[in-house]
């Protein structure tokens, strides 16, 4: 029935057989039952609240579905909907049929994010646990429609869109299904970001973690401290040689950009309509040289010769913000502006890769540490993250997220993380398990296989990347919640997330190339709990590879780039210039090194 296709070429203008779409859903729903017949639509169905659920919640869910479906390029545009004569069960030849109805109800028996979707010959029924579940039902409908539903305007030749009749019961295994994009190293324009959000939300990913600040750039407008975006948002040049290459090579072209608070509100609103929460990150107390270039008075220890500058270079720098009252006041201002714009309930505060020497060497910081009865600077690292998390909770009702160094520096010491701080485990699954056993909620984000800044294959044709490879098959095989973990650790592992760091990803096209199709595999893993067999399917559950092949045609229609399953197109290859392929780090070495480092620190 599902007729898997491995064709990866463009098929613009060709329509996929309708039933194929039942076999090409990503993520794969929990249960899919084909029913006889089809529903033919040529314009937006009449979306109406229904059921006996809470009226306000029901209205909101219906409005979300109406909004998401309303944005599609319906063949008849804004014209009054009519089913094409003779093609629907409800229409008789020569008669105008009524617009099919899409009823949306909230069912309190369903879990958050869960939904039931029935496509009938004359109607659509959506029951959802909450608004997010209703949004996902709309996303499933979008995948059931022909590929041209992913375009921005209708194709002239199309009169109607058929959808196969079906009943789908669906809910996610993991509540945090994340996409992390580093917009600090290379800025991603707002319009590129919005297109990505639309494509990632289509995969039912529900967290957009925006890495907004780092040594190489500060991307947030601050009306209270405007030097942050005036000074911190750009650099004069950028290193283009890889980390392990000598000599270092720079390109002397300025790079910069930032989001205004209104942009951030818009981005969060756009994501929110799609069931996706923006998790903004201000990376602290390290990875903050751009902040210090703007506000050098907040630094600890001696500044570099010539003063702090927005870094043109990559790696780990020794510069830190001082964990003192002046810094806390500025951070409170900036978090207030940021969260006032985005309304985020989760905020990432970094904590990664801190060389703590400059705290040790700063008499003011040492005095503050001793006054607080903290034994070491590592304790102060954890205590600082706790202070910021306390401030976020008290002043903005927001919950902090940290990289796993924040957990390592707190484990078994006098400084402690807030218990409700979520730990994002990037240095491997052992530290993920340790943090979960210590009672933290944990998001699995290990370098192998969730770092999408690494090569997708070991091939000379791949455009430059930091190292590799993280193959599509590695992502599909990921097990975020290992079966042999103790129950407590399994319960606290709340999700999985991919990371795209952008040191060597310099434009939107390259970014999309690195994200797709690996994000499809990550979404399938996070929704199902993983792992997923890439090439073997079973009845009713077509192989991921064939579902991805079909999904790539949707990306074609949407105008997004991706790495074709057979390898890069000629113009996506690295060539012999600045994008040329070089080996970079071997991912297995990186993973082993980081795991060891984490184990030592958490001792
Ligand atoms: C490690 S992951 C980093 C980033 C780099 C990335 C490159 C983490 C918390 N820190 O600063 O961009 O590796 O893969």
Image (cartoon, rainbow, N blue to C red):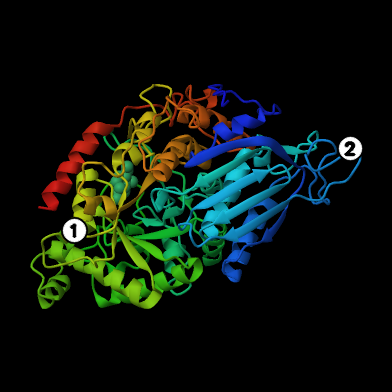
Give how far apart the Cα atoms at labels 1 and 2 are.
Answer: 67 Å
The extreme left residue here reads 375
Q: What residue appears at the point 61 percent right and 70 percent down from the top-left corner?
A: 55
Q: Which mark is residue 233?
A: none
The residue at the point 38 percent across, 69 percent down is 398
In the image, is 536 to the left or to the right of 325?
Answer: right
Q: Residues within 10 Å of mark 1 (few under 14, many from 20)?
A: some
Q: Does residue 217 appear in the picture of this structure?
A: yes
Q: Is residue 380 left or right of residue 400?
A: left
Q: Nearer the viewer, residue 500 or 59?
A: 59
Residue contact between numbered discs 1 and 2, judged by CB atoms under 8 Å? no
Q: Which residue is located at x 41 percent, y 46 percent? A: 237
Residue at horizontal 21 percent and vertical 33 percent from the top: 589
How far from the left and from the top, in percent, is residue 322? 24, 68
| Mark linked to residue 438 | 1
* For residue 7, above or below residue 407: above
Q: Position of residue 101 (x, y in %)?
A: 72, 53
Q: Residue 154, percent across and down?
A: 75, 41
- Mark 1 vs mark 2: give the one in front: 2
Residue 550, horizontal then vertical, whole percent = 56, 30
Residue 355 appears in the picture as rendered: no
Residue topped by disc 2: 93
Does dot 2 land on a helix, a strand or a loop?
Answer: loop
Q: Which of the 4 quarters of the picture holds residue 492?
A: bottom left
């Amino acid at each position: 029935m599902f007729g898997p296709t491995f064709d990866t070429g463009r098929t613009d203008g060709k329509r996929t057989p309708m039933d194929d779409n039942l076999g090409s859903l990503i993520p794969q729903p929990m249960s899919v039952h084909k029913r006889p017949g089809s529903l033919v639509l040529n314009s937006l169905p009449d979306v109406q609240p229904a059921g006996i659920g809470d009226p306000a919640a029901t209205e909101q869910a219906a409005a979300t579905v109406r909004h998401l479906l309303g944005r599609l390029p319906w063949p008849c545009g804004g014209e009054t909907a009519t089913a094409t004569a003779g093609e629907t069960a409800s229409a008789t030849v020569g008669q105008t049929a009524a617009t099919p109805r899409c009823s949306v109800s909230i069912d309190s028996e369903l879990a958050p994010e869960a939904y039931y979707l029935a496509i009938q010959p004359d109607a659509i029924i959506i029951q959802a646990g909450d608004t997010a579940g209703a949004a996902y039902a709309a996303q499933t409908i979008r995948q059931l429609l022909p590929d041209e539903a992913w375009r921005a305007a209708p194709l002239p030749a199309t009169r109607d869109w058929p959808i196969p009749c079906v009943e789908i019961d669906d809910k996610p295994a993991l509540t945090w299904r994340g996409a992390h994009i580093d917009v600090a190293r290379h800025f991603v324009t707002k319009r590129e970001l919005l297109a990505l959000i639309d494509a990632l939300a289509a995969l039912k990913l529900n967290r957009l973690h925006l890495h907004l600040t780092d040594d190489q750039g500060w991307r947030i407008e601050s009306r209270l401290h405007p030097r942050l975006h005036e000074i911190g948002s750009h650099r004069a040049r950028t290193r283009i040689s890889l980390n392990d290459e000598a000599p270092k090579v720079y390109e002397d072209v300025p790079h910069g950009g930032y989001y205004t608070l209104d942009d951030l509100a818009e981005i969060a609103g756009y994501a929110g309509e799609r069931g996706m929460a923006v998790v903004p990150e201000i990376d602290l107390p390290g990875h903050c040289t751009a902040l210090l270039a703007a506000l050098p008075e907040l630094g600890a220890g001696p500044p570099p010769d010539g003063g702090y500058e927005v870094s043109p270079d990559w790696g780990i720098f020794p510069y830190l913000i001082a964990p003192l009252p002046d810094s806390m006041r500025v951070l409170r201002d900036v978090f207030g502006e940021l969260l006032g714009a985005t309304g985020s309930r989760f905020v990432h505060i970094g904590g990664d890769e801190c060389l703590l020497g400059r705290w040790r060497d700063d008499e003011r910081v040492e005095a503050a540490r001793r006054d607080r009865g903290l034994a070491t600077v590592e304790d102060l690292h954890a205590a600082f993250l706790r202070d910021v998390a306390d401030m976020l909770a008290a002043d903005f009702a927001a919950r902090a997220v940290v990289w796993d160094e924040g957990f390592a520096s707190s484990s078994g010491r006098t400084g402690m993380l807030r218990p409700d701080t979520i730990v994002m485990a990037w240095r491997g699954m052992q530290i993920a398990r340790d943090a979960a056993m210590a009672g933290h909620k944990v998001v699995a984000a290990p370098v192998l296989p969730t770092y999408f800044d690494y090569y997708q294959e070991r091939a000379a044709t791949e455009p430059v990347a930091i190292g590799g490879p993280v193959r599509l098959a590695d992502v599909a095989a990921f097990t975020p919640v290992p079966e042999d973990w103790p129950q407590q650790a399994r319960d606290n592992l709340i999700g999985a997330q991919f990371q795209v760091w952008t040191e060597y990803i310099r434009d939107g096209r390259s970014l999309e190339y690195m994200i797709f199709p690996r994000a499809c595999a990550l979404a399938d893993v996070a929704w199902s709990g993983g792992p997923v067999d890439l090439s073997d399917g079973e009845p009713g559950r077509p192989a991921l590879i064939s579902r991805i092949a079909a999904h790539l045609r949707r990306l074609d229609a949407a105008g997004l780039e991706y790495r074709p399953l057979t390898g890069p197109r000629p113009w996506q290859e690295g060539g012999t210039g600045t994008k040329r392929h070089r080996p970079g780090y071997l991912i297995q070495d990186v993973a082993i090194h980081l795991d060891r480092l984490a184990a030592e620190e958490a001792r």
